[in-house]
Image (spheres, helix red, strand yellow):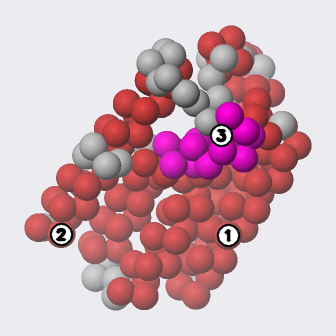
Amino acid sequence: AAQACLTLARAAGAAALVGGQVDDLAAERGWIAELPATPAEQVAWMDRINRRKTGALFLASLHLGGLAVRADAAQLDALARFGRAFGVAFQIADDLLDAEGTEAAMGKRVGKDAQRGKLTYPTVAGVAAAHERARNLAAEAAAAVAPLGEPAARLAALAHWIVARDH
């Protein structure tokens, strides 16, 4: 129980979810004096934010699941490597859906990020590069849990599905 509480506290705190959200909103609203200048710096910046936001939630969920089944250190490490790759892949896929999706398919307004001038993977790296990076991260996530065998096969399938979905 103590490990679970610590996991949740770390995932929600200033170094993770809350801090990442603050940085994201500050950039979106122009509160940061200097955003990264080059596309490579912008991608690295987005990776840091997304690992702290989306990634922190996935990492916490995976760690809690591992704790619940009494996973050993190697299994927890595999889940953490999956979560880090999956979290960024998920965010790239979400950015792509906002850029390419239709309101009918998504069930919500699309194109919001571009309208707000928000830095996203498609706007910084381009749509094709964003798709490729998402697929590579999904493969990395799947490879991370491959040693866990059949119980983790659904996680690997989820990683591939998340970047292939169209809504």
Q: What element carries label 2?
A: helix
Please give the residue where the numbered disc 1 appears in the rendered image: 140
Give the x, y percent position of residue 98.
70, 26
Amino acid carrying mark 2 in the image? Gln
Q: Main secondary structure of the magenta part?
A: helix
The residue type indicated by label 1 comes to: Glu
Please name the amino acid that badge 3 sits on.
Answer: Gln
Q: Which of marks 2 and 1 is nearer the N terminus?
A: 2
Residue 16 in picture, x, y percent from top left: 35, 48
Residue closest to the eye, 79 or 125: 125
Nearer to us of marks 3 and 1 is 3
Considering the image in quadrants, where does the N terminus appear?
bottom left
**Residue 56, disc:** none
Mark closer to the observer (3, 2): 3
Could you classify mark 1 by the number of other residues whose Cα lies within 10 Å: few (under 14), some (14-19), or many (20 or more)? Answer: many
Query: Measured along the vertical axis of the image, is residue 119 above or below residue 154?
Result: above
Graded by Cα atoms within 10 Å as few (under 14), some (14 to 19) or many (20 or more), the crowding at tag 3 reads some
Whether the magenta-drawn stretch holds residue 12 is answered as: no
Q: Which residue is drawn at 53% across and 85% down?
A: 148
The residue range painted magenta reads 37-50
Q: How far apart are marks 3 and 1 (CA)?
A: 22 Å
Q: Name the residue under label 2.
A: 3
